[in-house]
Amino acid sequence: MQIELFRDDYHFEERVSAKARSIRLEVRPDRRVVLVYPRWTPRAEALAFLRSRERWLREKLAEMAQLAAARPLPQQLRWDGSDLLQLRGRELAVRVEPARLRSVNVRFEPERIVVFAPPALRETPRKLEAALRQALAHQARLDAVRLLEDGAAPLGVRYRELRINDPQTLWGSCNPGAVICLSWRLVMAPPDVFRYVAVHELCHLVHLDHSARFWNLVGRQMPDYETHKRWLRDHGHQLHGWLPRRKA
């Protein structure tokens, strides 16, 4: 849905949420504007809120356009020996090596990522990408388990389950059942950024909201969290540029 409020080129979405407690606007790096409001809020009230934020929205869209121009999204992997992929904040070379295997195998080395592929699959980028995504998700799980275990003890909390997935709009989430979900793409970010998201979700086991008490708790666990929160705001869209999700 598009509402003709602004001359800027953007895509507008409305979302009625059972969990939302107030009206909020989300401006995403792909120039999507998402209006989220509680199910008990009249639509007219939500749209009035949107119109009241016109100036802020214009400035945010312009800011994101400048960021995108200065830091363009990575190109798709070409599998020709020239590719780079970000892992834990560093860009590593991606190399494809022939191997007598039945399926693709990925090995992470200090300075490169090696994808061992049987001859029949070396010319099949989709299968190479799928294997690389799976390997990165496994690395993300290893990092996440360590970060959650290290962060849970000082808080005196326990999570019930960890899920690693690839959401488009969230880096992490925590539900009332103590299930924590984290994006595998965080393994590409600097380690402290991944740690911030893990701490953020653990703190939701104490305060399942974004109240002042919640943010004070995050700050006590990680005093410099705002630096890493800002990194995600400014650079997070780049993590979705590598190995973008394929449409079925």
Image (tube, rainbow, N blue to C red):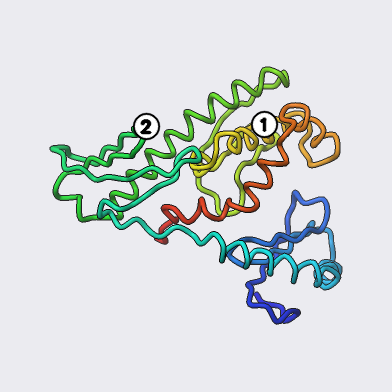
Query: Observer-nearest residue: 104 or 229?
Result: 229
Q: Which mark is residue 110?
A: 2
Residue 201's x, y, as percent? 67, 35
Question: What is the CA distance from the residue labelled 1 to the residue labelled 2?
Answer: 27 Å
Q: How many marks?
A: 2
The residue tagged with tag 2: helix, strand or loop? Answer: loop
- Residue topped by disc 1: 199
Q: Residue at the spot x=55%, y=31% of the render?
A: 162
The residue tagged with tag 1: helix, strand or loop? Answer: helix
Residue 8's x, y, as percent? 68, 78
Q: Residue at the spot x=69%, y=63% of the render?
A: 34
Q: Residue at the spot x=83%, y=54% of the render?
A: 22
Q: Residue at the spot x=34%, y=55% of the render?
A: 77
Position of 84 compared to 12: left or right? left
Residue 203's x, y, as percent? 73, 31
Position of 129 compared to 198: left or right? left
- Residue 1 lies in what quarter of the image? bottom right
Which of the marked residues, 1 or 2, is nearer the chain's N terminus? 2
Query: Observer-nearest residue: 83 or 54?
Result: 83
The answer to whether 213 is drawn above or below residue 76 in the figure is: above
Query: Observer-nearest residue: 131 or 98?
Result: 98
- Residue 64 lies in what quarter of the image? bottom right
Residue type at tag 1: Val
Q: Which mark is residue 90?
A: none
- Labels 1 & 2 near each other (Cβ < 8 A): no
- Look at the image and tell me in which quarter the C terminus lies: bottom left
Q: Nearer the viewer, mark 1 or mark 2?
A: 2
